[in-house]
Image (spheres, rainbow, N blue to C red):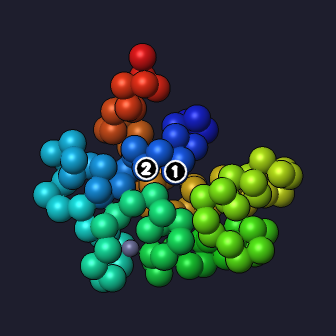
Amino acid sequence: MLAHSLTQVLTGHGCFGRYLCRLGREATPGCHHCDMGDEDTALHTLQECPAWTEQRRELVALTGFDTSLPAVVRTMVGSSTGWDAFIMFYRTSGPARCNPRSVPLPWYIAS
Ligand SMILES: [Zn+2]
């Protein structure tokens, strides 16, 4: 579960509309959680989607309000507080609500 959650966020190959649409499991790549009209991607969830503003608050504060992927990864691996904040964000935001078994892992991870 933990490895799968990290894979989803770091690669975007998870319960995100763009990835699911590419697999033919969603009709459109759009985000179902907001009306911004953006594609549902890992970065949209992590940085922009207003549906997860509250869920990302602690993580964003720990990154120094830098939500770039390198800053988030630095925060995750930099302290147990950062790690816990990422896990809490993941568990309470969109990707974790998807059944991990419904999304195949990329070939380079599944093999
Ligand atoms: Zn959204």
**Amino acid at circle 2:** Gly
Residue beneath the point at 43% across and 49% down: 12
Res. 9 mark: 1
Q: Kindly give the residue lying farthest to the top in the view shown.
A: 111
Secondary structure under badge 2?
A: loop
**Amino acid at circle 1:** Val
Could you tell me which quadrant the N terminus lies in? top right
Q: Where 72 sits versus 80, above or below? A: below
Residue beneath the point at 70% across and 61% down: 71
Gap in angstroms between the C-alphas marked 2 and 1 = 5 Å
Res. 12 mark: 2
The answer to whether residue 88 of the structure is visible from this angle is no
The front one of 98 and 60 is: 60
Residue 38's image quarter? bottom left
**Horizontal side, residue 103 vs residue 3: left or right:** left
Q: Are marks 2 and 1 in contact (CB under 8 Å)?
A: yes
**Horizontal side, residue 107 vs residue 67: left or right:** left
Q: Where is residue 75 in the image (x, y as percent from the top left)?
A: 76, 57
The front one of 52 and 78 is: 78
The front one of 30 and 93 is: 30
